Amino acid sequence: MKLGILDLGLISLETESSADVLNNTFSAVQLAEELGFERYWLAEHHAPDTAWRNTDLMVAMAAGFTEKIKVGSAGVIISVNNSYRVASNFRLASALYSDRIELGLARGSVTETYAKHLLDIDIKDVDLEKKYEDLILFARNQHTQIPVPPYGTQNPALWTLSSGTGGMESAIKHNLDYCISLFHGNEWSQELAEAIKKFRDVFYEKNERIPNVVIACAGVCSDTNENAELKLNNFLGNGSTWKPNITGSYEKCHEEFEKITKDSGVENFVFCDLSHASLKEENLHHLSKLIENEVYG
């Protein structure tokens, strides 16, 4: 099993500041590399309880703090970002940190309040499909109108991110790696496992390569089930819209991941820790036991 981290940059506004979360994030990405995690992805969310919005800067800085771990966006919200600018920034980062930069593309939305400050046009007039396709072409320096430097360097790895199976068709069409989230209301099922297997077969037929598939999970991994639940509840409070799907001790979390792998054949995961930023490093140590189990049995 290969395990990575998905960091939403969430702030518990009553007890934490953006500076606290940022400092803990950059410490966590260095620790994640030390502990053997595969990747560290940073999200883009435009909401009051997040510590950053600009994932391109965060990704480049995280790469600069580390040496080998893959770092990326999960993901850039296509509708409110300039495709050329995003591609330029990620191509530059990939040139500096070859084979480590991953650009995740998200079709998510933002509120109209944020959208009007992010765009020069009404968000209702945005041609999402054109922006999506332009970004892919720019990121690969294949656009017919505008070349995108640096030239002759490694392209960022491109991923499509999805909360359901709808993103599979786009991944196949554009030859993109694929990540599906299980904590946006999409519960694990045998039907979903079969859909992933079929996706991999069709993708291979179309693109003549085996796609990288990552499953995103969320919750808390701690020393005991009780402590994990306590950390989760202390952070989320009442009325949270997040839907954690894996929470418990290392042993319990391991069982959950193993079930998904057995059902689908997918061995790549990213895990989103839903607890206070000050607990990130402690929880990384608990999660790392999943990796140690793979190495040492």
Image: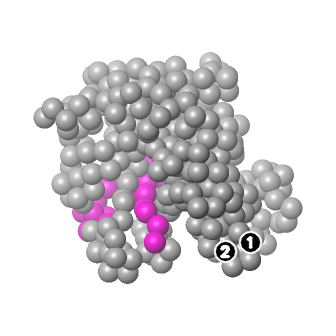
* In-front residue for pair 37/123: 37
Amino acid type of the residue that numbered disc 1 sits on in the rendered structure: Ile
Q: Magenta span covers which residues?
A: 175-196
x, y percent for residue 168? 43, 70
**Contact (Cβ within 8 Å) of mark 1 with mark 2:** yes
Q: Residue at x 48, y 47 (%)?
A: 100
Circle 1 residue: 146
Residue 69 in the image: above or below residue 125: above
Q: Quadrant of residue 58?
A: top right
* Residue 191 on the magenta span: yes
Q: Residue at x 36, y 59 (%)?
A: 213
Amino acid type of the residue that numbered disc 2 sits on in the rendered structure: His
Q: Is residue 81 visible?
A: no
* In-front residue for pair 198/27: 27
Q: Residue at x 74, y 71 (%)?
A: 146
View extreme (front): residue:
152
Circle 2 residue: 143
Secondary structure beneath disc 1? loop
